[in-house]
Amino acid sequence: MSDTPERSLSRGQTIVLVATAVPMVAFGGLGAVGTYSNITSVFHRSATALGVVAAGEGATLVLALVLVGLTMLGQSAPAAVRIGLWTLPAVASLTGAAVAKTVTEAVVFAVTPMAMCVSAEGMGLLARRIVVYRTGVDAEAQRRNAAVMQRLAYHRARAANHPDEKARNGSELESWKLAKKVGAGDALLGANLVDVQRGRLTDGADAALAGMFVLPVTPVTPSAHGVTDAPAPLAVEGTDEEGVTPPVTGVTPPVTEEDTQVTPELETVPPEGVTPVTLPAELPVTLEEIAAVAGVPTPVVGEPLSDEQLVVVLRHLRYTDDPPLSYRQAVAAFREAGFVGGEQRIRRAWGSLMSHEESGA
């Protein structure tokens, strides 16, 4: 089934369609009256004329009503109905031409029944288009495409696995002939393909313009991506008022041979400069941590992302290297990582990220 929402006909459309259908029915009826008059002029019997009209225009009218009814129900018409819509008027035309006395009458008698044929086909086509407009489903096109695909599948399998080489070659040629018919006459398929190509062209043009008009990136302070400044040198307790560090004394207890400790002697240790202590750099911030700070679910590869999640992913990718990645590099990393997002949405998210960086947020 189609995902297209069902639409209703407007009042103006309904009036125009009714005004279009009335002449079809009227001229089909006039064709039947003309056939009746033609046959009566030859046989001078109304019963015979009515039989010819019933066999030609009457049967065609029945098939036309069946076609319209099936179409309005969203179903395709059987082949017998479609063939009968042309065969029965043709038989009536041949009958009129056969009973005519002159060539002129033969031409007139042969043309008259075609009015009912055209009216029936016109009503069926109009009903079909109404259903397609309202529901988005073209049952007739689906029937044709299904038949073509079934034959195509058969010939592809036959071309690949049939033991006879001649049969394989014949199916290979038939497959290429059938490939030309796939989707033929399907207006919805054509519209969908146009939409797909329009989206691709839009993304390509957007990417080209983004590369041409991207603004220079303002340098970011180290604190923006998790790097902390080195701490100041540690102060040593006991420094005197003049800033001189007093000597540090250590106790070296000499030991005698009898393992008796004697009076310790004080050993003076010369003062040394204090070496500044640099704390180890922080671990890189993970995508989960950035998402938690932003208050959004962690972005998942392959799934559609919200605008906030796009900003989180771009922020994470931008600072995976030093210096930070540019727009093109970030987009390339975004695609390579497998994240999903349209080019236009990515560019908007990048602009939001840049505005936050420039404002110091």
Image (tube, helix red, strand yellow):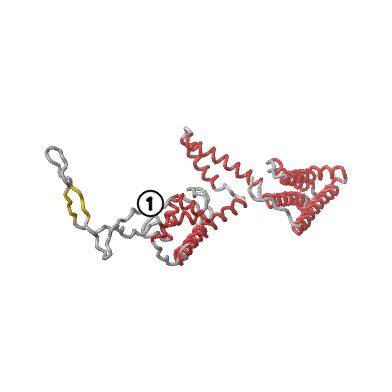
Where is residue 347 drawn, in percent x and y? 49, 60
Quarter of the figure with residue 324: bottom left
- The mark tally for this picture is 1
Nearer to us in this view, 49 or 202 = 202
Q: Which residue is located at x 57 percent, y 40 percent?
A: 151
Residue matched to label 1: 283
Left of 50 or right of it: where is 239?
left
Residue at point 27%, 60% (across, down): 239
Please state the horizontal and vertical placement of residue 119, each as a whole percent of the image.
75, 51
Q: Secondary structure at mark 1?
A: loop
Among the 4 quarters of the image, the one containing residue 78:
top right
Q: Is residue 83 left or right of residue 203?
A: right
Badge 1: residue crowd in 10 Å (few <14, some 14–19, many ≥20): few
Front-most of residues 156 and 26: 156
Quadrant where the image shows the N terminus: top right
What residue occupies the far front of the structure in this picture? 263
Q: Is residue 43 above or below residue 358?
A: above
Counting from the top left corner in percent of width and height, residue 18 is at 78, 55
Residue 304 x/y as whole percent:
53, 50
Is 300 displayed left or right of 21 in the figure?
Answer: left
Seen from this angle, which residue lies furthest left? 257
214 or 179, which is in the foreground? 214
Give the camera-side residue of 129 and 205: 205
Residue flagged by tag 1: what amino acid is it?
Leu
